[in-house]
Image (spheres, rainbow, N blue to C red):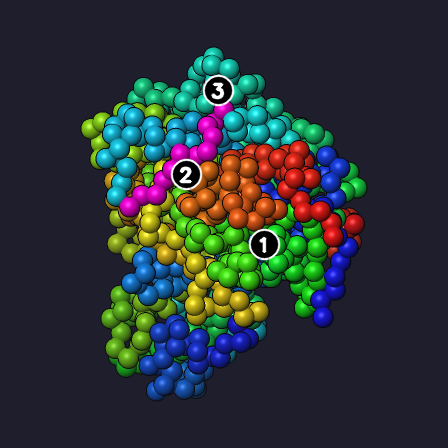
Amino acid sequence: MPNLISRRELLKRAGFAGAAAVVPVGGDLLSETSTPPAALQTAASREPYEHLTALESDVLEAMVARIIPTDANGPGAREARAARYIDRALGGALASSRPLYSVGLAAVDRLSRSRGQAFTALSPEEQDVVLSDIEKGNAPGFADAAAFFALVRAHTIQGTFCDPYYGGNAGFVGWDLIGYPGVRTFVAADEQRLGADVPANHKSAYDYDMFTKAGMGTMPVER
Amino acid sequence: MATRLKDTDVVIVGLGAVGGVAALPLTQAGLDVVGLEAGTWLTKRDFAPDELRNNYRGWPQASQKANQEIPTHRPNAASPLFPRLTIHPMMNGVGGTSLHYWAQSWRLNPWDFKVRSETSRRYGAARIPTGCTVEDWPFGYEELEPYYDKVEFEIGVCGAAGNVNGTIDRRGNIFEGARHREYPMPPLRGTGFTDLMAAAARTLGWHPFPGPAAVNSQRYQNRSACMYHGFCNRGGCHVDAKGSTAVTTIPKAVATGRLKVVTRAHVTSIDADANGRVAGVTYLVDGTEYVQPARVVLLGSYTYENTRLLLLSRSRAYPNGLSNNHGQVGRHYFSHNQTAGVSALFPWKTNSWYGLPAQGVAVDNWADDNFDHSNLDFIGGGNLWVYSDRRPISAASMSTFGKTDKLWGSEWKAFIKENADRTNTSYLQKTTLPYEDNYLDLDPMVKDPLGFSVCRITAEYKDNERKLGLFIQDKMEQWYRAAGAVAVERAPVGPMGPSTHAYGGTRMGDNAETNVVNRWGFSHEVQNLGIIGASVMGTSGARNPTLTAQALAWRTAEYVTKNFNSIAPRRT
């Protein structure tokens, strides 16, 4: 169904019509001279991107790292590779959100620059101020800023707590954060008692052979 | 040019929870049956324990026929449409939504069959809300009891009986109607948390009990016992422990040699002849058109599609849609008020990461007419249900009960780290009534990819539902507080959009002026058209509809087997 809908229509439906009319879609508002903050230059946080541009991905990486920060409570969305999850999903299940990311990420950076600096050049505390304004819709020239923030937040949570098969929750850091002990195919009564100590098994659904599908079993015969 | 297929005794439209049940008594009685199913066979290898895919991306329905015809919704005829859902609540597949449902398998309370007369008798007729079109069922609970029993044993329902032949057993639901024997299996086990909630209910003087489920609590009919792994909610079973018709009645019907299953069959019309009888069904498979002639048609898709197919099937005999010469198709529609929920925060971990939504504890003290409504301003009640079901994305998306400034950042992260396993959200199903101005029809603007109008819901919850919702929220908060909750949060009454508990549209009753089907589930207007599913139900009760719809389907199918020659037109 998505291929029947034009990008313009999608933008209109999402309430981005105003922004789309005056702003070229894409990463072209992101300055070529923007300098990724040092935190983004570590090898661990860099990913090959399939769908987002390099500059879009820089802004997204910075956003998800503030939504679920790396802090005293351990790794956050950056270590979970939430942005990688989003990038991959934008070519598949979340494809209808691709135009929203183009417009939204450009608008985040534009808002930040209108206050003096590229989003990625801000300190984490300064980034939080910008994001709070976006969350509250207090962002002149950024149509439906609050909806974009909610979208990125929801996808950041997906990318941090999903099955690692999808490219997020890398190293099971999301599941470890909230104490989810991992995918099991059998759970004993004792493991459902209050106070039970169920060790994290760090298993994805697709670590179990029966769900990888290929080469096992046959289709039921149709009569 | 459509390909005309060989005539059959019975064609069933939809091989889901009800069509899949009806196929068994029909074929066992020696009738030849063609089952048309829009989906395909799915097996346990398809049912990966994958929250993102099942609960956020809506697999498999996101890529199915159902998703191309999601009903539109508006609260009333003067309102514009609300935003349309992106995932249909139901799925296609052999077994239908019985593949991924919660499998809670309740019998209705005897009161649910007599809401109008019992309310009038006990409180006076004025207590029936204005505009409410509720009628007594054409029969009582006792008539359906043997069919409940057949289905419970055929698909495998576990539970604790509360009333066997009038003998009350306090381990079960003391408010239930009499059953003539125990469930075929004991209930699913409790968890530490649900046991604690049960104990808290007893301190309030209530009667907690484990709910019934079409899930194997032990090995049954050569299928595995439940593994409690935690992905039953919108997921199929990886060990076939859930009693979906795909692994119970349908394979048995296939084994008789009399059920032909046609998958990927997209039914476009039910065809009437010049005499006003149905002659068969027209369907598409990947763009190729077929006509399946049949002597009896059983319409067994979901409530929205049952209604839509009738309204789309116009003919000279039925210019306003099949079986709609009395204008009743689409009327008396309602969907369970499952909104107005209650969530709680506890100061300790509930250990709810595993288990299933059917593994829980129920309280029926405030359901149906189990309590005195003399000094209340509503009729009906709600079933309180607390269960074990948590997965990581939804856990991290939890409410913070107003205890964090923001829903992101370090403070929020610390909160979810501590509290992701300390919450519980109850499931509160409440009596919901039909009203004159709540109905289904064809959307004049929105079409499916074939160009056929989708179903349009015009419905909203009324005063009775709102007042009852608040009452039940009070009871649920009381229960949570008794168990030690430190914070409780209430959700508002939501919109009445597309639902997994959708009733009416082809209501059953003796009066042809106000009902589409008779007491046997056959059309008042079309002699050889039967309709099965919750679309024939005139009341909701305070509990999941599937077992009742399945018992009715068995009963309608049995009626066909006993009366085939008088129902079915002679072959010409």
Residue B230 point in image, percent of width and height: 54, 40
Disc 3 versus disc 1: distance between alpha carbons? 41 Å
The front one of A69 and B264 is B264
Position of the N terminus of chain B by quadrant? bottom right
Which residue is denoted by mark 1 in the rendering?
B276
Judge from the rendering whether residue B30 lies leftward or rightward of residue A86; answer left or right.
Answer: right
**Dot 2 or dot 3, earlier in sequence:** 3
The residue sitting at 52% across, 27% down in the picture is B143
- Where on the picture, by quarter, is residue A49? bottom right
Front of the two marks 2 and 1 = 1
Q: Secondary structure at mark 2?
A: loop
| Amino acid at pointer 2 | Thr
Q: Secondary structure at mark 3?
A: loop
Q: Residues within 10 Å of mark 3 (few under 14, many from 20)?
A: many
Reply above or below: B293 against A17.
above
Question: Do tag 2 and tag 1 residues touch (Cβ < 8 Å)?
Answer: no
Reply above or below: B540 against B309.
above
Q: Residues within 10 Å of mark 1 (few under 14, many from 20)?
A: some
Residue B55 point in image, percent of width and height: 51, 52
Q: Is residue B8 magenta?
A: no
Which residue is denoted by mark 3 in the rendering?
B178
| Amino acid at pointer 1 | Gly
Disc 2 versus disc 3: distance between alpha carbons? 19 Å
Which residue is denoted by mark 2 in the rendering?
B539
The magenta region covers: B131-142
Judge from the rendering whether residue B239 lies leftward or rightward of residue B70; answer left or right.
Answer: right
Question: Do tag 3 and tag 1 residues touch (Cβ < 8 Å)?
Answer: no
